[in-house]
Amino acid sequence: MAALTDGFNARSWLFAPGDSERKMEKAVGGPADVVIFDLEDAVAEAEKPRARDQIAAFLAAQPVDRSRLWVRINPLQGPHALADLAAVIPSRPGGIMLPKSRRGADVERLDHFLSDLEAAAGIEQGATAVIALVTETAQSMFTTGTYAGAPRLAALTWGAEDLAAAVGATDNRNADGSYVFLFEMARSFCLLGAAAAGVAAVETIHGDFRDEAGLHRRAQEARRAGFRGMLAIHPAQVEVINQAFMPSIEELQAAQEIVDLFAANPGVGTLGHKGAMLDRPHLVRAQALLRTAARACAKKGD
């Protein structure tokens, strides 16, 4: 089964705690491209069974198209993942977020569980997509290049907080607010792993949900680096992320000029344009930018 890359585009991925129906309702009613009902970090150990049932019932009450409604389960190496999946898959979530993924083989293992549960529930095989959190453990830092060909995979994302705990760091930020080198490396490994797998890279959270300017700056930097979307921990962050991951009119015009220039000169490898030399990588980036904008507009119904 191939990775789910064709046409997949989501700018904002909003977490909502699975033990709060009010917060799930608010998240679903907002403009997030993907809403992730959380069974892992946002839910206390004793509340996980109730949260499973609550998410399953909430999903079942939603419209038939649940492609934007995902669930973050607990790690496969822990005691809760199978119970999480058994509870929520019959209610047909659009996808599963796999935390603390250690390697591409974890996604393959998850695929086996999902295939059995889909078959039991009469759901089309492969209907449930996967996003993997790939840098939350020390071990996983060495395996971000192993996800190529992983079944159901739509995206990779990364986490700085669990990695800090894993290595015993007291902080993951420098004095100026930037990430310490190790965590910038994790971010880069996620981006490279996603590119190697041919799936979307999704930037991690911006923890201060009141810092709108900082969030917008980080989201724009992430898009320029190659990330296709960003995780959000509060509904107030969603519109900022959506806007930041939409190319500007000026960027779109410049990209269209490059595409038109190469179209008017077929068979030419290098072209001069506005004082710069353009070659195939410039064309590929321009085409990708236009596709991203077209998919985002299609989501909005523009």
Image (cartoon, rainbow, N blue to C red):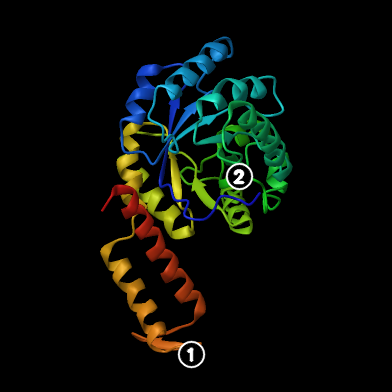
Q: Amino acid at mark 1?
A: Val
Q: Nearer the viewer, mark 2 or mark 1?
A: 2
Counting from the top left corner in percent of width and height, residue 300 is at 29, 48
Task: Rate crowding at label 1 as few (under 14), some (14 to 19) or many (20 or more) other CA atoms within 10 Å.
Answer: few
Tell me the distance, in whole angstroms, between the alpha carbons under discs 2 and 1. 38 Å
**Residue at 34% over, 32% down:** 235
Disc 2: which residue: 152
Q: Earlier in the sequence, mark 2 or mark 1?
A: 2
**Disc 1 on helix, strand or loop?**
loop
Spot the residue most to the front: 122
Q: Position of residue 68 (x, y in %)?
A: 43, 38
* SS at badge 2: loop
Q: Are marks 2 and 1 in contact (CB under 8 Å)?
A: no
> Which residue is painted at 48% across and 72% down in the image?
284
What's the mark number on residue 268?
1
Image position of 23 with respect to 226: above or below = above
Q: Amino acid at mark 2?
A: Arg
Residue at 40%, 59% (x, y): give it: 292
